[in-house]
Amino acid sequence: MRLVTSWLREFVDVKASADDIAATLGLRGFEVASIEPDINHNGDGDAVIDFEITANRPDCLSVLGLAREVATAYDLPIMLPSADAGAKSRLATLPAGTSEWLKVTLEDEDLCPRYAAAIAEVTIGSSPAWMAARLQAAGVRPISTLVDITNYVNLEIGQPMHAFDLAKLAGAEIRVRRAKPGETITTLDGVHRKLEPDMLVIADRDRAQAIAGVMGGAASEVSAETTLVAFESAYFTPASVRRTSKRLGLKTEASSRFERGADPGAQALAIQRAVALMEQITTGRPLGPIVDCAARQAEPKRVHLRRARLALLLGVAVPDADVERILRSLGLEVTRTADGWDAIAPTFRVDLLREVDLIEEAGRHYGFDKLTATFPVMTQPAPAPDARIPRDQTVRRVLTAAGLSEAVTFGFIEAKASELFVATTPVPAIAVANPLSGKFDTLRPSLLPGLVDAVAHNRRHGRRDVRLFEIGARFAPDGETRGVAIAWTGGGSAEHWSAATREVDFFDAKGVAEQLCGVLDVPVRFKPLREPFLVAGLAASIVAAQATSRTVADGPEPGAVIGLVGQLAPAVADARGLPRQDPVFVAELNLDRLERARVAASDATRPLPRHPFVIRDLSIVVPDALPAEIIRGTIHAAGRETAAPLTATSFFDRYQGKGVPPGAVSLSVRLTFQALDRTLTDAEIQQSVDTILAALVREHGAQQR
Amino acid sequence: MSTPQPSPESVAALVAQFETELAQARTARDAQSVRDRYLGRKNSVVASWMQLVASAPVDEKKNIGRYANELKQAVEARWTRYSESAPDAAPAGAVDVTLPGRVPALGHRHPLTVVRDRLEEIFVRMGFTVVEGPEAEDEWHCFDALNMPADHPARDMQDTLYLATPITYSDNDRRTLLRTHTSSMQIRHLQAHQPPIRIVVPGRVYRRDDLDLTHSPAFGQIEGLAVGEGVSLADLKGTLLAFAQQMFSPTSRIRFRPSFFPYTEPSAEIDLSCWQCDGAGCAMCKKTGWIELGGCGMVHPAVFEAVGYDAERYTGFAWGIGIERVAILRYQVEDIRLFYENDLRFLEQFPY
């Protein structure tokens, strides 16, 4: 709302500068977009303050509305429009009655409870300079006397008006009704529009002449030849105007006022003001009375305000005198009662409905700066946070410590990216119904597309080594899950002068996944996986291992998939702008599922062994297709029976080549034996190693090297 | 080498000669041999003078002894000074300690996480519990329950991204959407708990905005909510003031500028005194002395009614602050897109 200060001063005799007024209202709920000083370039002090009016204050889309705020802020009287000869905003004295010129029928009063009209005999020309200048300063283009008057009244008191050329209204009548099926209209902007049956129109005897509250029709537009006009000043219900405006994609000065809520009591006033202006600029004279059709009178809202409630909610006791002064100045009728006040809110304040609304008014003008900062009383200890929060922090710590930096990508991606990452058993992607761009039209089913794009961004900017991770929501038809994904390309170890850099491989990514699962106390296994977006043979699914008695009750079944790890297929990398030849390793884990697969570890520490451990290395040749996990299983199974307790096994070498037959592999296993109660004898250990070796020979045809 | 007779002149000459020879020494070994010739136990200059003391007649003993001691002390002092400033020879197996070490890889938290962690930490200290809610929501939780019925003009303020397929835990058949604010979690929490309530809700929210220098279709918010008996707007001011002083500067001030949000009444914008100029006006605060931080207010009774609370018995306050907004201010980031590009050159500027 562009407020012209000279116009404002016709309603309130405020001496303050435009800057001061802007700053003062800025602290009372009216944000200032800009100030244009000295608009007349003559040093008269006239300025325009452009206020941003919040959705709850349609009354302040007018000079009069803002004048009330200024009057209250500066504790000055308001000079309302009046029929007094000396009034700056003068009203014509015009009776209400029936007109011989125009018949008005309210057919759909649910959408238009009040419709006022008046006829005038006019000679249309150009508005005087002062009026044209004011309109221009307020941001409205001057057109002709009649149109300018309706705009002027709208800006001044906030009641949108329209003027019809009476000669063009068939049957000299106005019917306020819903559009008929198939009805059309050409609006003032020259657009031919199809109307829908729930849109309210202003029609003459034969057809729609205006879209109620939105825009007039071209057929009855006032022109230079017009001699008789019908002024319209109506109240259209906000929902109806809003719906129609939205459906037609047509937003106007009028519609934006009506849809937020015009003053249901200002219809006659607006006509009185328009007629006075018409007489003032000698462009016409009224013919007959105001035809004021009211289905129901606007009822002012009665609201009780308790002094104690006011003090409780604001946390400060506003003196009674201030409460009364503020509310009265804003146009409320206030009567003191035992515990506070009975107030009657004026019809233009559509936002004042209940006690708390009055508390805001009192607080706002009393000044929030007068509140003493206090701290809310705590009566109970704070409960524990959402379990996901400490868990995510742990995950983040583990990953940053592993050298991965955290990425944040959007929750939506482009369908094209989503399709590249579709699994063999696809989960339907969720589309955004009204995306602003194709880049963000699908909710991400996985964190990988976004993360891979982030890797591509870094590669494009010359970064060779990229390690990123992201923690975030993934979307599927059965709900939202929290996941973590990693992407790693370039060096597997940091570059250092002492040795050549090793390239990242499958086991780097797998190691990170293992570390995460370990820290979260989730036993997992890795199984070969075939997914179209991963390189076959270099991909694994991460599944929950055997559940134990300590697993949470609703944890995933053993074998349930928790995540995956592998090398991104070169075709996918290529499609996302990554160099085809660069291996990119990725992993993604479902954190919610991981959380449920957690095996609660005992807090009790284990005693440190008092007897020495003994290490034996064993080298065996086995078929190279035999998974290490199976060999480990055989060793563990055999180790359960041995005389010397087997406490650890590790693979420390894997060799293929000279001395090992093709199709076989030499594996070196380190076995650690230790007993808690005694020092192991050589005989015990030899017997144990023999037992394990025998099992390996028996189960896998292993040969000792 | 012939040694002159002890005298004050010969002491000065020998000291000067010692210094010259030391200065000419090229290696530590050379320097050591110079030192040994003057200070060694046997056959050195000082040793020969000491022998003279022993053999001198009684009346000369005193003087010769004094010259011998003067010479010894002067030469020792110069040797100490020389050996402290001379570079040591590298011992066997020495490394060039100025070569770079093997620095273990260390990743960085995203700046939005750094800010979020800090915000959470401050509010947790004030007795708030951190909770999280779903990003895919339904209209009831996101709008209706927050006093924004279908025809409410305020719904325009937050242009919404709707979903083509229903998802979520919805207990109603309303349209599903990406939440436009974390306030939807207020509703979920109020429904599931009883006062007193004191929570902060960090999370991602979505708007139908294009991505440009200052706008993003997705961004982070942190919402706060306190509900109880007698909770007031002054309490909100105190809470946010304490937050501002811990987050920004111990001298930070808070200003409430009245505003409008459908789910709070009274409502206010939170202004923070500019910590660069402490309110005097600078480029950062656009000469106003204040920086807008977010919105806040007292929970609207209609919200309490929507979740079945006694709006007469309980009052509450709520606020919402943009995480990017805080990060932009704190780290002076010019382009919001930097947060989502995940350029390591940007990310690595933030703490571990």
Image (cartoon, rainbow, N blue to C red):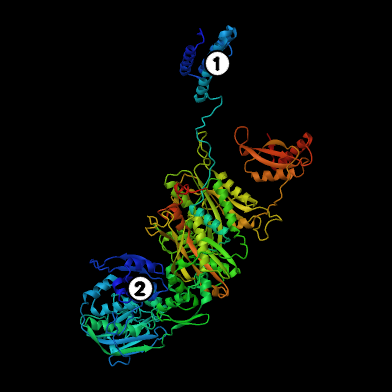
Question: Which quadrant is the N terminus of chain A positioned in?
Answer: bottom left
Amino acid of disc 2: Lys
- Measured in 3D between alpha carbons, the distance from the residue under mark 1 to the one under mark 2, in whole angstroms, is 107 Å
Q: Are marks 1 and 2 in contact (CB under 8 Å)?
A: no
Res B185 seen here: yes
Q: Circle 2 sits in a helix, a strand or a loop, which is it?
A: loop
Residue closer to the observer: B31 or B204: B31
Chain of the residue that carries numbered disc 1 in the rendered image: B
Residue A522 placed where, x, y %?
64, 52
Residue A680 placed where, x, y %?
77, 37
**Location of residue A200 with respect to B4 vertically, above or below:** below
Mark 2, other Cα within 10 Å: few <14 / some 14–19 / many ≥20? some
Residue A647 placed where, x, y %?
72, 42
Residue B180 placed where, x, y %?
47, 65
Amino acid of disc 1: Asn
Q: Which residue is mark 2?
A: A251
Q: Circle 1 sits in a helix, a strand or a loop, which is it?
A: helix
Q: Please tell me whether mark 1 or mark 2 is closer to you in this view.
A: 1
Task: Answer left or right for A77 relative to A339.
Answer: left
Chain of the residue that carries numbered disc 2 in the rendered image: A
Q: Residue at x 50, y 8 (%)?
A: B4
Q: Residue at x 48, y 16 (%)?
A: B15
**Location of residue A525 with respect to B3 vertically, above or below:** below
